[in-house]
Image: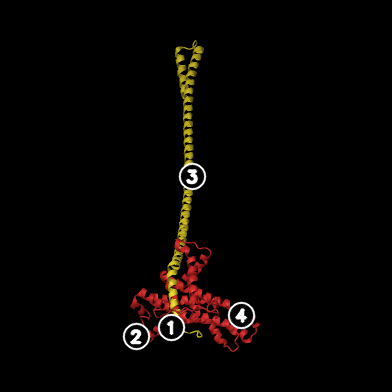
Chain colours: A yellow, B red
Amino acid sequence: MENLLNFDSGLMYWTWITFIVVLVILGSKAWKPMIKALENRENFIRESLEEAEAARQEADKVALEYEAMVAKARQEAQNIVAAGKETAERMKADILNEAQDKSAGILKQAEIQIVAEREKAIAEIRTQIVDISMAAAEKIIAKSLTPEDNERLIEDALKDYGKN
Amino acid sequence: MADHGQGTSTNIGDKIIAHVANSDVMIHFELFGIDLSITKHVIMLWIAAGLLVTVALYASRKYRSEERPIPSGFTNAFEFVVDFVRTSILIPTVGKDHVLKWGPLVMSFFFLILTMNFLGLMPMFNYINHGHGGTTATGNFNMTAALAVITFFAIIIAGIMEHGFFKHWKNMVPGDVPKAVLIILIPIEIMSMFVRPFALTMRLAANMTAGHIAMLAIFAPIFILHNIYIGIGSVALNVGITFLEIIVSIVQAYVFTLLSSVFIGQSIHPNH
């Protein structure tokens, strides 16, 4: 015992025996389950992180798609409104034009009718004037005029009237 | 300790050695001609092993019953150390794929050596075998040599398991060197095969013994000069050295385990 470097086979054998016992018991009951659990947890954390990353990217993608969709919808809505406005404008213009055309036609027709009516009235008036004149003239002139004079006068009068 | 230092003519060096050395055979025991005598260090080894098995089984109970256990309290602290050995010793040396195969051996090395180192720091084993100071089981060359022999065989077994019997020995020398170089290289490699465990043996035992010798040497002047006031300085200094010893205990357990794992890893992944 006085020498630190004494050979002591007993201790060596006991070291091997004890170490193997510890290795066998703890190897199967403690170290392996713990190493497995640590590896499982490591994998679980890695997978969870990867999944979370994938989910985040997916969410980003969906958000982008959604934004694009909203933008597209907004654009479409704007297009629809613009088209509606254009159609309305066009329809308004058409209606106005049509109305104007129609009113112009009515006016023209009215004018034509007026002119025709006037001419008709004038012709009628003239006929009546002639008749009245004839009647009056007959009454005034009947006694002094010969039938020849009478006829000549009528002829003259008709000629004058014809000049007018 | 005072009763040992009383004899004025006693050689203090012998006393110190007696304190750090193993006890005489306490129970002589032989089995089939093999000497299995029980000494103080054997008892310390058993206490360490019993303590480790109890603590490790208690701390790992959740891992045996649950698929994905969530550790808490002591289990969490224990798991931290296990994960430290796994991530900083096993994975970088033997590789991720071999952790489950070589993990139990490396973990057993680390925890058993650490437990024995810490037990050696506790000044209570002088009560075994009537006095003789706080010795450390891992400070005994026979113990560390036995552990290094396990490493020696583990290195060979790891290589053979991975590459087959002949390929393993071939792996020990690089394949692309000139024949002439091999004449020098082969003896060097064979020497290195034996030097590695020898270095493991010496490093652990010497480091674990050195701290105890230093502490005893610092206490020695009290008995040499018969002056208890020197004790104030000695105790103060030894408190500091005890803290240093705690660090040395951890570091030496780590170094022995790391180097064993590195050698096993080199055998699995020969980088020649």
Residue B179, label in figure: 2
Query: In the depicted view, which residue is nearer to us: B157 or A7?
Result: A7
- C-alpha gap between disc 1 and disc 4: 36 Å
Mark 2: amino acid: Lys
Q: Position of residue A52 (x, y in %)?
A: 47, 59
Asked whether residue B218 appears in the rendered view, the answer is no
Disc 2 to disc 1: CB gap under 8 Å: no
Using residue B235 as the reference point, say whether residue B253 is left or right of it: left
Mark 4: amino acid: Leu
Disc 2 to disc 3: CB gap under 8 Å: no
**Residue at mark 3: chain:** A
Q: Residue at x 47, y 69 (%)?
A: B53
Label 1: state its secondary structure: helix
Residue B195, label in figure: 1
Mark 1: amino acid: Val
Find disc 3 in the rendering and name its residue.
Answer: A81
Give the position of the N terminus of chain B as an image quadrant: bottom right
Specify whether disc 2 shares its chain with disc 4.
Answer: yes
The outermost residue toward the bottom is B9
Label 2: state its secondary structure: helix
Mark 3: amino acid: Val
Asked whether residue B58 appears in the rendered view, the answer is yes
Find disc 4 in the rendering and name its residue.
Answer: B237
